[in-house]
Amino acid sequence: MLLAAKWVLPISQKPIEDGAVVIEGSKIKDVGRFRTLVNKYPNKEVLDFGKAAVLPGFVDLHTHLEYSVFRGACDDLGYADWKMQLTLKSESLKKSDWIQSAYLGALEALQSGITTIADITKSGASLKAAKDAGLRGVIYYEVSGMDHAAVTDIMTKAIKGIDKWIDAASGTNLIIGVAPHSPYTVSPPLYKVSTEWAREQGLPLCTHLAGSKAEYDFVKYGSGRLSDEYWDMVGWGDILWQPTGVSPVKYLEEWGVFEGGGMLAVHCVQVDEPDIDILEKYNVSIAHCARCSAKLGMGVAPLSNFLNRKLKVGIGTDSPASNNTMDMFDEMRISLLIQRGMTRSADFTAEDFVYMATLGGAKALNLHDRIGSLDPGKKADIVVVDMSHSHQIPTRDPYSALVYTANQENVVLTMVDGKILYKDGKY
């Protein structure tokens, strides 16, 4: 198969005008000018998308597919209120509801050109949905609990569950990981034991970290609504929490959570330079979820500081519960505009954010040898975006057109492993 379009964006090299990508089986065989490749491979089926861009599939570095049903149900709330409303509404869902919700999220991911996800799930619904949809990614088994005495029981249950998930993911494009949820839902010994066990097993790790002022105040001062109303709601009201006197990042370092590397930290909004020193020291990857952070009033991550330290950063949509859509174009655009507004400079470019949404996310998951760019030998995880609309013409710079004018409705094809999973509005 040969995919042709006005623009091909390999990410690893400059855009190719009037370009094409040759696919053989599950991999990319060749990339270059259309005229050259159509002569070189005369027997290949040609799909010519005209005024469109062909680029690597997006890597959504933080998702909760199973939360899709909560779209619009917890809007216009600050983080603590949002978390409590989400917790209350979750009690209404049965196992089958979680699965249907995750299917909805998986379909939206494909429509948005997302081919790889990094999903945290408690129910396991995201694993089933991602598997059935044909997505690539890491599915993290969520671990939580603040009772020190319950650590052994929690881990015993988690290990059994993870073993089942690994069996279920066998033969797919999915990897199973472990996600101690966050500093306000995971006790120090559970953080330590779960991360040490995951590293012993060679499993990827992920945690929500330093996302909100509410989390920061809980960890450092032992105050705020997370330690009062939220804990009472989930049945932890009788558990004593001693304020640590340090930031969430420093707190996890003191418990050895970052030792051994391999941690993906989600959000990292409430951080200062000493915190970034720690993240750099342990080579922590960061999932940047700008729209979620803005919508819930969590703050703005110091993205330029992360990148100046050469930290691996990718883009996450979080979930429709907090973000309403899984539109990676909106995510890139709004994130770029927020950063420019905050820094009062135009240092960030559209190309920077397309990179983070593709190869940057792949590097954060240590999958960059397989995905993230259009290079021969890599997996054929590809998205095609229509750029023929009046508001996109003339297209002087394909990166600018993608970030400033496109949205998920413009995706005309999503491919994973050389298989077309979404085309022209049909899954």
Image (cartoon, rainbow, N blue to C red):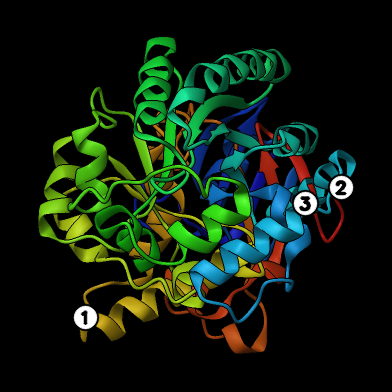
- Return the residue nearer the eye: 393 or 155: 155
Please determine whether, in this image, residue 348 is positioned above or below residue 143: below
Residue at the spot x=68%, y=33% of the render?
Answer: 418
Determine which residue is flagged by label 3. 91
Q: Compared with residue 150, is residue 305 higher up or lower down, i.e. above or below?
A: below
- The local crowd at label 2, few if under 14, some if 14 to 19, many if 20 or more residues have their Cα within 10 Å, is some
Question: Would you say residue 300 is visible in this rendering?
Answer: yes
| Residue position marked by numbered label 2 in the rendering | 97
Residue wearing tag 1: 343
Mark 3 neighbour class, 10 Å CA radius: few under 14, some 14 to 19, many 20 or more: few
Q: Is residue 194 shown left or right of residue 387?
A: left
In the rendered image, the quadrant that contains the N terminus is top right
Q: Which of marks 2 and 3 is nearer the N terminus?
A: 3
Return the x and y of residue 218 as percentages of the image width and height: 35, 58
Picture residue at 31% right of the left edge, 76% below the top: 339
Kindly report the distance in space between the C-alpha atoms of the residues bearing marks 1 and 2. 43 Å
Image location (x, y in percent) of residue 399: 43, 69
Q: In which quarter of the image is residue 253?
A: top left
Q: Which amino acid does label 3 sit on?
A: Glu
Callout 2 amino acid? Asp
Where disc 1 sits, the SS reads helix
Do the numbered discs 1 and 2 sit on residues whose CB atoms are within 8 Å?
Answer: no
Q: Position of residue 180 (x, y in %)?
A: 46, 35
How far apart are labels 2 and 3 at the CA level?
11 Å
